[in-house]
Image (cartoon, rainbow, N blue to C red):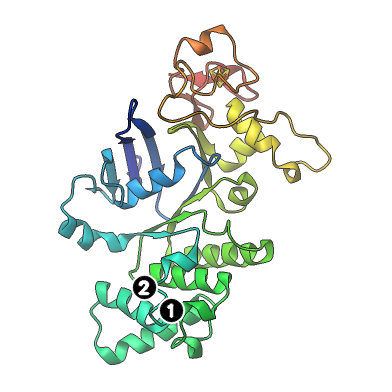
Amino acid sequence: MTRAPLLAVRDLRVHFPATPHAIRAVDGVDLDVGSGETVGLVGESGCGKTTLARAIVGIEPGARGSVRLAGRELIGLARRERRSLCGALQMVFQDPATSLDPRMTIAGILGEALRLHERPVRAEVDVRVCELMERVGLDARLRHRHPHEFSGGQKQRVCIARALAVRPLLIVCDEAVSALDVSIQAQILNLLADLQDEFGLAYLFISHDLAVVRHVADRIAVMYLGQIVEEGRAETVLAGPKHPYTRSLRGAVPSLEPGVPPIVSVRGDVPSAARPPGGCRFHTRCPEAFERCARESPPRVAVGDGTSRCFLADSAPGGEASA
Ligand code: SF4
C-alpha cells in the first residue's frame, strides 16, 4: 500500500477578483510532499509560486480546493483550529529583514515562538532560545541584540530557528536564499540539509533558480502561469525534461552541463494571469508549439516517473506517457 503524502494539495485555486478579468494566480494545482522529502518548485517570477506557498500555509484567504497536512484538511479551517495546527507547517520568506520584528530582540522573537507552541516555564525559555540559536549556527551570547545588528545570512538563520521552535513537519522556503550572497546561500542550504537529517523535516523549496533547486530537491515541480506543467524525480527532470518550458529553464543554467550551450531560451515575458492564453498556456512562448497547441489545453499525463502537461510529452527523450 502506498503511504499518503505528508502534504497533499489537490485542485488548489487562488483567483483574485479584478476588472475585467479575475487574476488566476493559482489554477488547479496538485502537488505532494512526502515526509522527510524536499520538493523544489521552480518557475519564473509571476508564475504563481509565492501565491501557491501562501495558500498552502493558510495566509491566502481566497484559496479553494484541498490542502491536507498529515491527513488533516487545512482549507476552510477556522482561524483558531488552524492555529492549533500551524506549528506543523512553517514558512521561511525571501527577505529576513522584513519578516523579523525590528523592535524585538532575537531572544524575544524566538521566545515568542516557543511560548506559542510549548508554553515552557520562564526559565526554560532562555535555555531553549540558546539551544535554537546554536543549532542554526548563531552565537547564543548575541540573543539580546536586535535584527538590524545581524547580517542577512544571520537573520535568515534566526528565521529558520523561529520555524524550528514549533517543531514543524514541513517548512515552505519561499526564495529563502535568493537575497543572499552565493557563499552564504551554500551555508544556508547546508544548514537546511543538516536540519532535515536531524529532525526528518520535509521542505517545499521555492525558487526561480533551477541551479539552486538542483542542490536540494528530491523531486522538482515546474510551475507556469498558475499550473504545474512538469513534475518528477529531480535527476530525471534535470537530465531529460519532458516539457519545453522546463527545457528552457534548464537551458538557462549553463553549469548543468559544462561546455554545452543552452538548448533553448525562453522568449518574452510571462503573460498576464488575468488573461492566460487559450489552449496550452505556454504556446505563445513555446519554440515547439504547433497548430493544436493554441486550440486545446494539454492534460497532465503520467510520463516516466513524473507528469507533464504537453502534447509532446511522450515524444520527449525518455518519455512514454500514460493517461
Ligand atoms: Fe509547447 Fe504545445 Fe507542448 Fe504547449 S503543448 S508546451 S505549446 S508543444
The residue positioned 59% from the left and 36% from the top of the image is 237
Q: With 92 as the anchor, is 255 left or right in this view?
A: right
Asked if the beta carbon under badge 1 is closer than 8 A to the nearest atom of ligand 1, the reply is no
Q: Quadrant of the C terminus?
A: top left
Residue underneath mark 2? 165
Would you say the residues marked 1 and 2 are in contact, meaning their CB atoms lie under 8 Å apart? Answer: yes
Tell me: residue 19, above or below residue 46: above
Q: Quadrant of the N terminus?
A: top left
Q: Position of residue 103 (x, y in %)?
A: 39, 79
**Rendered image quadrant of residue 110:** bottom left
**Rendered image quadrant of residue 203:** bottom left
Residue underneath mark 1? 132
Residue 33 appears in the picture as rendered: no
Q: Position of residue 72 (x, y in %)?
A: 23, 49
The kind of residue on which mark 1 rests is Leu
The residue positioned 45% from the left and 65% from the top of the image is 98
In front: 132, or 282?
282
Q: Position of residue 39 (x, y in %)?
A: 48, 47
The residue positioned 76% from the left and 41% from the top of the image is 257
The kind of residue on which mark 2 rests is Ala
